[in-house]
Image (cartoon, grey):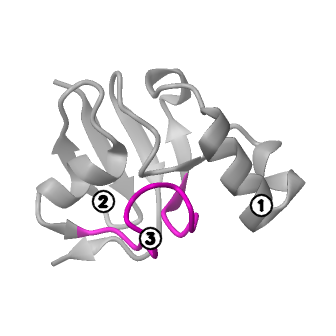
Amino acid sequence: MPRIRVEPIGIEVEAPVNETVMDAVTAHGYYWPQGCPRNGECTNCAMEIVSGLGRVTAMGRWERANLLRQRGPRSIEDPRLRLACQARVLGDVVVYKRGVEPE
C-alpha cells in the first residue's frame, strides 16, 4: 500500500491506490485545511509534492482550471503544486502542507 509523508508535521500514513491525498490523511485522524466540499473549487488544500511526482495521478482539466482561476497562471507552471483533494496516490509520496494537524 502506498505511503504518504506530510511535512512539516512529519506524519506518515498508508493509502489505498487511487485514494486522494486529502482523503487518505484525514482518514487517519488528521485535519487538512480546506474551504470547499473537497471538489477542487477553493484550492485551499493546495500542497507541494516534494518527492514522488510521478506517483500521483496527472492533473485533470478541473483541477487546472480552478488553480488558474484562484491562483493565476503561475500556479500551473510548477507541476509540484497540486490540490490534495484531486491528486490520487499511485505510490509513495512526500508532500508539504502547512496546517495539517491532529484532529
Q: Nearer the viewer, residue 56 or 94?
A: 56
Q: Earlier in the sequence, mark 2 or mark 1?
A: 2
Residue at numbered disc 2 = 10
Magenta segment range? 31-47
Going by the picture, which residue comes out furthest to the left? Answer: 28
> Type of residue at label 3?
Cys
Q: Any mark on residue 51, and which?
A: none
Q: Residues within 10 Å of mark 2 (few under 14, many from 20)?
A: few
Q: Quadrant of residue 59?
A: top right
Asked whether residue 36 appears in the rendered view, the answer is yes
Foreground disc of the pair 3, 2 = 3
Q: Any mark on residue 36, and which?
A: 3
Residue at numbered disc 1 = 69
C-alpha span from label 3 to label 2: 25 Å
Which residue is pictured at 30% across the width and 27% down the height? 18
Question: Is most of the magenta stretch helix, strand or loop?
Answer: loop
> Type of residue at label 1?
Arg
Residue 71: x, y in percent? 76, 64
Residue 43: x, y in percent? 58, 63
> Type of residue at label 2?
Gly
